[in-house]
Image (cartoon, coloured by chain):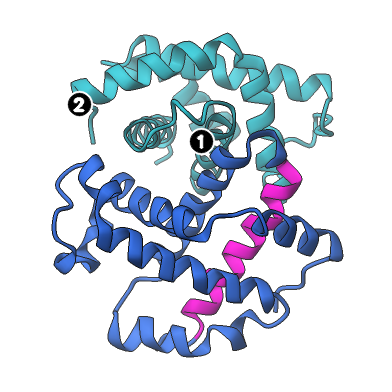
Amino acid sequence: MSLTKAERTVILSLWDKISAQADVIGTEALERLFASYPQTKTYFPHLDLRPGSAHLRVHGAKVVAALGDAVKSIDNIAGALAKLSELHAYILRVDPVNFKLLSHCLLVTVASHFPADFTADAHTAWDKFLSIVSCVLTEKYR
Amino acid sequence: MVHFSAEEKTAVTSLWGKVNVEEAGGEALGRLLVVYPWTQRFFDNFGNLSSASAIMGNPKVKAHGKKVLTSFGDAIKNMDNLKGAFAKLSELHCDKLHVDPENFRLLGNVLVIILASHFGKEFTPGVQAAWQKLMAGVATALAHKYH
């Protein structure tokens, strides 16, 4: 699965808006993840996951920053996220099913903040982009 | 069996009251066909599905989307017995329509995204969670009679 030129363009333009509110978007996506899919909290026993917590903000910012790295190297996402891929494979070992859940919550957050920009084409491109990111992060699992 | 708290039921019904079923249904089905093009396999006789704008503007898509979402309305009136409410539709989707239940999950998630885009801040994490529970319940109910 790879991104067309048109998809890259639309991803980049929506990214501009997302990155301006990176912390808010990242934090909210995680809040949504933990509210709808409480089992995902099992990966964070070391963090305070209550809405509004500093831990949540820091981690949300981290997640969106990583997406930013992928966007900046959209032609080579595997290269941009190589270290993160190893981290998830050997240390974190988050079950692959959870990447779909977080991706969905990211899309819900973006849709709620930028409804006019989140057209059907933008939705498709971002869904695809997040699938590729998820694939990269799980590709060294076995 | 899925149990919904009073809070969850309120989160669902209060939002549902503000949903334009015809518009949202068409949008949800349209987005499903655009974002996950393989789902078009069930709609060969729908005419022009060649681009996002063709799909979103297609009158058959809009009509069918409205039908699907109207049936969601029935789910919301029967949140305590989704399996019973969807028994006949489940048999239909298995025996006549041959739809992989994974598609119910995909459509449910697309609908959640559409609600988020319509309601913005009002679609809080808590409200989303209630809706995700309903979507999962409906998907399970629709798959329940598969054999």
Element type where label 1 sits in the image: helix
Q: Which mark is residue A4?
A: 2
Q: Which residues are magenta?
A: B124-144
Q: How many numbered circles does the render carry?
A: 2
- Magenta stretch encompasses residue B102: no
In this rendering, the answer to whether A101 lies above or below A2 is below
| Chain to which mark 2 belongs | A
In this rendering, the answer to whether A15 lies above or below B48 is above
| Chain to which mark 1 belongs | A
**x and y percentages locating residue B58 in the rendered image:** 24, 54
Q: Could you tell me the amino acid type at mark 2?
A: Thr
Q: Nearer the viewer, residue B5 or A80?
A: B5
Horizontal placement of B19 versus B81: left or right? left
Q: Nearer the viewer, residue A96 or B67?
A: B67
Residue occupying image coordinates x 49% and y 33%: A89
Name the chief secondary structure element in magenta: helix
In this rendering, the answer to whether B133 lies above or below B129 is below
Residue occupying image coordinates x 72% and y 62%: B13
Residue occupying image coordinates x 65% and y 59%: B16
**x and y percentages locating residue B80 in the rendered image:** 73, 79
**Quadrant hosting residue A51:** top right
Q: Colour of chain B?
A: blue
Residue occupying image coordinates x 62% and y 56%: B132
Element type where label 2 sits in the image: loop
Q: Which chain is cyan?
A: A
Q: Which mark is residue A139?
A: none
Q: Residues within 10 Å of mark 2 (few under 14, many from 20)?
A: few
**x and y percentages locating residue A41 in the rendered image:** 73, 42
Q: Could you tell me the amino acid type at mark 1?
A: Leu
Q: Which residue is mark 1?
A: A107
